């Protein structure tokens, strides 16, 4: 949530900052701003809306070689120009951007800033006003910044300009992601390497409670006690083409199309030279020593976790509980004697999941993170990491990360089973390559999916998704996809459950998407469809080849029964995409959402 950038060097910083913010828009996009510093002082431009709106507000004739920028997902204060970052201190000397939440901002305001008139409703403004207060009390900027950081409770990634100190950007991090990028005669700051790949691929990771003095020719990382930290840089393994839309109208469509390739990449990444599946032995030992696996995740990742439960239980014989992270951390169930915790998180930054990780580490239990983001907070802080190898996912609605999560979970369960001496009744590598082909044929059938969106979703205000067993897990994901990008109210249900209440909502023409890929419950789901059709529903039945009946809307290519979620979710992703498109919604940046949810 929220993205920040900074540049100090020889070039005009405006364009670099704006381009960087465009790459960070996935983190929040309700308002944005930049502050640039030149010999005339600091100039701030900020706007409600997207970076495109900010661009129009930025004056061409202001040139400056130092600057900071921010794209916002509002937490404190409505999205408007006043609450947009950068924020400035009362005298205008200090200018600051912040990603995170300061939990004690009210207390700090009361204690230290009673005589300062706040210009915004944000928690962030308190930080910049405090820095000015302490500098007026006689501290240097670095001292005032450090002193302020010590008072803050909460999360922050901060970049600060001092109008009286032209050569420096002051930076700090706690819990919110932040990197420093290195260049020849310039340095940059960014929430994500993606933002500054335009100028450098060399980055230095920052740790929590570190402060950084960034100058054109140097970067000094310090702990809050002033101790200097030496840390090597790394090369960001990202390609510009990974983060560009190319010829696609939307990232979401590009990412849906990438799924067959991602499947194949995952198989390769987890194969050794002999072509056998291989997972870090420590992870497999941890899995096989655990008496219960607790999967912790949010949103789409939680839905992938539900599928993962089936894999670990059915393939590897490991009992599993799947929990929503925001609930688990504050209402922990009785734990088993030897639990292992698996955090599933595309971004590796989700605050709801991280608070659970922190608590579990305190309890001393082993932890594993399954993530798409190498070096992310949840990856660094867990004992072990499994990577998704899905490439950057930029559209807010998760698609390829979901299928990648399921694929890696299946492979991990299969390897754990094999190492524990359980004979699998299927060759997962072979079955996954069949899946990749099936996914390819579905993403190649876009016209059909668009037609379904037209036929079923053009005018409706709600829709239901039903399925049983694994199809139920996918129904929930299908409903989430549709509601988050098209704003059609959608719910995923266990097929048998609608009649226990929700069937009251079925009216003439209500669309019901029914998945029928599970042989054992095929008759049951058909029965559930009949119940809703009898009450006027408009059924869209998506059945697995071999289980289809006359009149079904779509027949999916046949794959192994345990791997059907990888295939059945594809039409649901595409149908949601077209429903959103037809309604004129912003597919990649749906309202009120952000890609990386770094607040609880
Ligand atoms: C929906 C979506 C979200 C995320 C959720 C968790 O399309 O993307 O529901 O799955 O915010 O995010 P991660 O996986 O980054 O922890």
Image: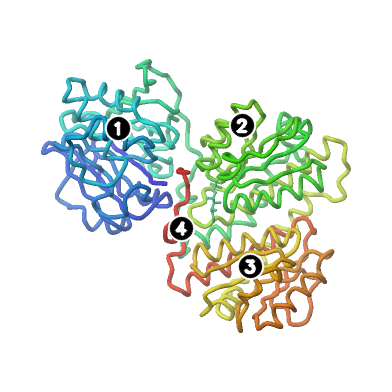
Residue at the spot x=73%, y=31% of the render?
286
Q: CA distance from mark 3 to mark 1?
A: 51 Å
Q: Quadrant of residue 6?
A: top left
Q: Position of residue 113 (x, y in %)?
A: 22, 33
* Between marks 2 and 3 in the image, the one whose residue lies nearer the viewer: 2
Residues at discs 3 and 1 in contact (Cβ within 8 Å)? no
Q: Which residue is mark 2?
A: 360
Q: CA distance from mark 2 to mark 4?
A: 39 Å
Q: CA distance from mark 1 to mark 2?
A: 30 Å
| For marks 2 and 4 on the same chain, the one whose residue lies earlier in the sequence | 4
On residue 245, which mark appears?
A: 4
Can the viewer see residue 480 in this picture?
A: yes
Residue at the spot x=68%, y=82% of the render?
535
Q: CA distance from mark 2 to mark 3?
A: 37 Å
Q: Note whether 526 is above or below 367 in the view shown.
A: below
* Secondary structure found at label 2: helix
Residues at discs 2 and 3 in contact (Cβ within 8 Å)? no
Residues at discs 2 and 4 in contact (Cβ within 8 Å)? no
* Between marks 2 and 4 in the image, the one whose residue lies nearer the viewer: 2
Can the viewer see residue 9 in this picture?
A: no
Q: CA distance from mark 4 to mark 3?
A: 21 Å
* Secondary structure found at label 3: helix
* Secondary structure found at label 1: helix
Q: Position of residue 415 (x, y in %)?
A: 78, 40
Q: Which residue is mark 3?
A: 571
* Between marks 4 and 3 in the image, the one whose residue lies nearer the viewer: 3
Q: Which residue is mark 1?
A: 108
Q: Note whether 448 is above or below 363 in the view shown.
A: below
């Amino acid at each position: 949530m929220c993205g920040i950038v900074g540049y100090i060097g020889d070039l005009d910083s405006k364009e670099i900052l704006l381009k960087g913010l465009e790459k960070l828009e996935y983190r929040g996009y309700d308002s944005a701003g930049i502050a640039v510093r030149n010999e005339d002082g600091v100039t701030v431009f900020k706007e409600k809306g997207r970076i495109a709106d900010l661009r129009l507000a930025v004056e061409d004739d202001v040139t400056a070689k130092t600057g900071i920028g921010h794209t916002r997902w509002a937490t404190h204060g409505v999205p408007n120009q006043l609450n947009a970052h950068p924020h400035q201190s009362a005298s205008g000397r200090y200018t600051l951007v912040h990603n995170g939440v300061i939990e004690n901002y009210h207390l700090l305001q009361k204690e230290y800033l009673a005589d300062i008139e706040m210009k915004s409703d944000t928690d962030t403004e308190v930080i910049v006003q405090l820095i000015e207060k302490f500098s007026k009390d006689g501290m240097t900027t670095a001292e005032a910044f450090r002193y302020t950081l010590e008072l803050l409770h909460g999360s922050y990634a901060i970049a600060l300009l001092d109008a009286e100190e032209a050569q420096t950007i002051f930076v700090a991090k706690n819990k919110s992601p932040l990197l420093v990028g290195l260049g020849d005669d310039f340095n940059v700051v960014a929430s994500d390497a993606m933002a500054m790949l335009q100028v450098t691929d060399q980055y230095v990771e920052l740790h929590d409670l570190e402060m950084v003095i960034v100058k054109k020719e140097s970067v000094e990382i310090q702990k809050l006690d002033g101790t200097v930290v030496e840390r090597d840089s790394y090369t960001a393994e990202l390609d510009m083409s990974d983060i560009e839309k190319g010829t696609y109208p939307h990232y979401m469509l590009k990412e849906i199309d990438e799924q067959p390739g991602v499947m194949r990449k995952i198989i390769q990444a987890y194969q050794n030279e002999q072509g056998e599946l291989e997972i870090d032995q420590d992870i497999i030992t941890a899995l096989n020593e655990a008496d219960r696996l607790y999967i912790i995740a949010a949103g789409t990742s939680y839905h992938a976790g539900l599928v993962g439960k089936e894999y670990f239980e059915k393939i590897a014989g490991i009992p599993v509980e799947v929990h929503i992270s925001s609930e688990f951390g504050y209402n922990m169930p009785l734990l088993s004697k030897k639990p292992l915790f698996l955090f599933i998180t595309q971004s590796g930054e989700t605050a709801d999941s991280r608070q659970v990780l922190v608590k579990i580490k305190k309890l001393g239990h082993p932890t594993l993170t399954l993530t798409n983001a190498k070096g992310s907070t949840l990856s660094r802080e867990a004992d072990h990491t499994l990577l998704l190898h899905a490439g950057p996912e930029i559209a807010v609605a998760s698609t390829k990360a979901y299928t990648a999560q399921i694929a890696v979970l299946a492979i991990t369960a299969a390897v754990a089973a094999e190492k524990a001496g359980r004979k699998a009744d299927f060759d997962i590598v072979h079955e996954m390559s069949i899946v990749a082909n099936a996914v390819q044929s579905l993403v190649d059938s876009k016209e059909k999916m668009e037609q379904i969106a037209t036929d079923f979703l053009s005018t409706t205000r709600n829709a239901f998704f039903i399925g049983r067993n694994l199809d139920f897990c996918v129904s929930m994901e299908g409903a989430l996809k549709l509601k988050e990008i098209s704003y059609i109210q959608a719910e995923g249900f266990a097929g048998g459950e609608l009649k226990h209440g929700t069937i009251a909502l079925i009216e003439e023409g209500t669309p019901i998407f029914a998945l029928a890929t599970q042989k054992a419950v095929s008759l049951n789901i058909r029965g559930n469809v009949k119940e809703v059709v009898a009450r006027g529903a408009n059924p869209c039945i998506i059945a697995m080849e071999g289980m289809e009946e006359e009149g079904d809307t779509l027949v999916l290519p046949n794959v192994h029964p345990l791997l059907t979620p990888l295939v059945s979710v594809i039409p649901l992703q595409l149908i949601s995409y077209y429903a959103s498109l037809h309604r004129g919604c912003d597919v990649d940046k749906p309202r009120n959402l952000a890609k990386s949810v770094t607040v609880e």
